[in-house]
Image (tube, rainbow, N blue to C red):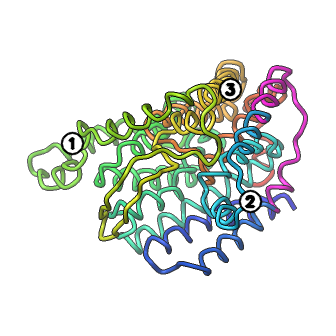
Amino acid sequence: MTAKRVALFVISISSLLIWDLLIIKNLLGGKMETILVILSLLPFVYSSFLLLNDFRFESSYFKFIITVFFCYEAVIVARGWSFAYEDIKTYIQDGSILWPFIVPVFIFFNKKLITFGYFFKWIYISGIFFLVVGIALPTLLIYRITAETFVYFALPCGFLLLNATYLSNKKVNLSLFALSLSILSLTYLARRSGLITLLGFVAAGYLINRSSASSPKLFRLLPFIVIIAAFVLFNQNFENIKDMLFNKLVYRISEDTRSNLFDMFFKQMKEHMIFGKGMNATYYFPFLGFEVDGVFYGKVEWRHIIENGWLQLLLTGGIVHIVLYVLVLLPGAILGFFKSANMFVKACSVVILLRMLDMFFYGMPSLNLPYILVWICVGVCYKTSLRKMTNDEIMVEIKKIDLR
């Protein structure tokens, strides 16, 4: 039964990415878009309801701070709520307005290790899907407008890399290939924030598993692979490849694309710094229209996304929101990394820390599997019983579903 619930959960949330890609390609729109999104959300909510069944707190601090956090999030939602039909429709379809205030309930995700075993399995399948579709339809990876959405199928594979100690060579190697293809795509497209996230997973996965005797051979050879790749790319005989891959990135490293945006944002936030503007918060920053990869975006004046995770928290709930967010995530990550006896909880802590870093560059709270995973990991890190388990004890549970 758990296997079916996890399968339904991952498939339903991942299907939203497919609808996004079809919308981007102008293959979907209007009523059909709404119908398909709802058809995905119904099984997602149903499976989530069945999997959110661990309500036992093992930390008095966590019980207190998460209660305060949830209460404040409810206040933010209430301050911005609208019963207008168009607004309700937007709340359901847009993953960046209402859903970020619901996703934190995934701290209550089932903490049985067999559940995570099935979760690993479906992340692996998502990685296979990414590789097969990416190879069959390479245009998804060479255009910014689709690549930024498509790589979300591969991003959860970073969690598999972090847990390489418990998994088979096949699963870890495929995850590494999926992330590597994503890195190549975002390097070519010069997507700086996405690159930082992907490289963070690869580097952290290698560092926390490098001393493990059961770590896959390809993973242990990663430093040598990187050195060889660097030598090839910077060899004069491969100058054309290097130029094609890095030209955009070199140009964008020093490019300032957000100063004007942030300046206008902070000017409008002067009277809202403490408590923010509520869930439906917007700020004025006009676009006269622009084109990306052949897709034209019309005029926009009032925006509800600030393109920075921390500033998004500021926009909706002010400094209070940011402080509470940090007080929930950071102590959990510290406990998970320094007070755990196994690699699984350490991996969860790394997921949290990488998200907090990513939020400085982009890291927008939204309805997607990587963000849901962050809150699942928060719940794991505060679970004393899980932190006390040894790697051998976790391995026993993993072997029950033959993930190696």
Image side of residue 147 versus residue 382, left or right: left
Closest to the camera, between mark 2 and mark 1, is 2
- Say what amino acid the circle numbered 2 marks: Phe
Secondary structure mostly taken by the magenta-highlighted segment of the chain:
helix
Per the rendering, the mark at residue 83 is 2
Q: Percent from the top left, x then y, of residue 175?
A: 52, 52
Identify whether 280 is placed above or below 207: below
Q: Nearer the viewer, residue 230 or 218?
A: 230
Q: Secondary structure at mark 2?
A: loop
Name the residue: 90% across, 34% down. 56
- Mark 2 Cα-neighbour bin, 10 Å: few <14, some 14–19, many ≥20: few
Residue 17 visible in the snapshot = yes
Amino acid type, label 3:
Leu
- Name the quadrant containing residue 7: bottom right
Q: Identify which residue is drawn at 30% across, 42% down.
A: 257
Q: Position of residue 104 (x, y in %)?
A: 72, 42
**Vertical relation: 169 (above or below) 273:** below
Question: Nearer the observer, disc 2 or disc 3?
Answer: 2
Q: Which residues are magenta?
A: 46-70
SS label for mark 1: helix
Which residue bears the numbered disc 3?
A: 324
* Residues under numbered marks 3 and 1 in contact, where contact means CB atoms less than 8 Å apart: no
Q: Residue at x 82, y 62 (%)?
A: 46
Residue 15 among those drawn in magenta: no
Q: Secondary structure at mark 3?
A: helix
Name the residue that disc number 1 marks.
250
Q: In the image, is residue 97 above or below residue 55? A: below
